[in-house]
Image (cartoon, rainbow, N blue to C red):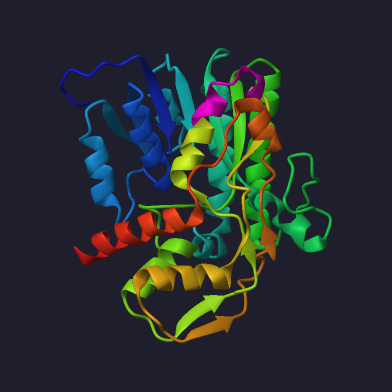
Amino acid sequence: MNGGAVSLKARALILGGADFFGLHLARRLVTEGYHVVVVDTLTRGRDRAEVTALGATPGVELIGGDLTDPATWAALRRGWAQIYLLPPAPLPKAVESDPVRAVRGHALAALHLIDWAAPGDKVFFASSGEVYADGVEDGVVQVPTEEAEPVVVGDLAQPRSAYAASRLFAEAALVHAARAGRSRVVVGRFYDLYGPRMGTDQLIPQMCVRAIRGEDPFLVKGPHRKRAFCYVDDAVEATLRLMEAPAAVGEIVHIGNDEAQTAIGDLARRVLRIAGVEPRVVAEPAPPGSPARRAPDLAKLRRLTGFEPSVELADGLRRTFYWYRRTWAS
């Protein structure tokens, strides 16, 4: 635990918080006056410096632990103002290579939390709009997507479908636990977040790094696919507002930016303009299982919290690109 006098109004627990979203959330909670405890395996790669810096921040404590291990939960203290369950979002390659790990991580983390949490605990679970991917491809889910749209799980032999099913299992367990009074849970389904400190296997960071390295030709997979990208600071703001909204308890709510859908090819051209390079852009097929469109309907989030996205894509891309340029140049 870090020393130093810090004005603290409450304690917040972030389970699985040493990744992209968790790092941003932890920093924001500290600025809000919380003492933040982050529980994670702490085995990440290039972002180790970021995790170390977070651990050195006054008001932050890092604890090593595996959320699928009952011993980790048994060792946790009680008495938290806010609890965030952010099970690692496996990268596409990791989902394909080890789907059992992805499915197991979501299921066990959710079940352990239900058994561990107290009835009055305020809990946020991070899920994903990926749960609609099969339904969008089958033409039964509308885009932009409301929470009331049907969820369709395709062939469970396909790793991405199994991954989506594991998210849904965790959602169902936690929502019904909340409605049974076992804790106060809100589920947030995130849509295409991006920003500094994100893993470079993800789309926007990958494009930034490839532009910085001067890749030519510049390969773009599925350039006609469309996404509604949400800057991480907006996602953190929406999450915090949901945690303060009593009517959100027991609800599933979409979190993202619904102001515009951007084609992947256009996104690549934006990144290249920011980088100041003009490589030859070459289109490639989209990855298997990647839907043609993905975008949230935020009516429910607005109704519950009054949230509006504030970071436009042009601004968010500049912030993200410049962060990777500084980081990869060092």
Image quadrant where residue 139 sits: bottom right
Question: What residue lies at 53% left-to-right and 34% top-to-bottom?
Answer: 238
Work out whether residue 216 can be spotted.
Answer: yes
Image quadrant for the C terminus? Answer: bottom left
Query: In the image, residue 184 lies at what x, y percent?
Result: 60, 19
Report if residue 259 lies within the magenta region: no
Work out whether residue 90 can be spotted.
Answer: no
Seen from the viewer's position, the closer of residues 68 and 130 is 130
Question: What residue lies at 50% left-to-right and 55% top-to-bottom?
Answer: 313
Query: In the image, residue 78 lies at what x, y percent?
Result: 42, 16
Is 109 on the left or on the right of 319, as rendered?
right
Image quadrant for the N terminus? Answer: top left
Question: What residue lies at 64% left-to-right and 33% top-to-bottom?
Answer: 301
Image quadrant where residue 140 sits: bottom right
Q: Can you say whether 218 is above or below 291 in the image?
A: below
Seen from the viewer's position, the closer of residues 266 and 59 is 266
Q: Can you say whether 99 is above or below 232 in the image?
A: below
Query: In the image, residue 280 lies at what x, y percent?
Result: 46, 87
Seen from the viewer's position, the closer of residues 20 and 210 is 210
| Residue furthest out toward the left | 4
Query: In the image, residue 259 lies at what x, y percent?
Result: 62, 50
Q: Which residues are magenta?
A: 240-248
Image quadrant where residue 290 sits: bottom right
Is 171 on the left or on the right of 77, as rendered?
right
Seen from the viewer's position, the closer of residues 244 and 54 is 244
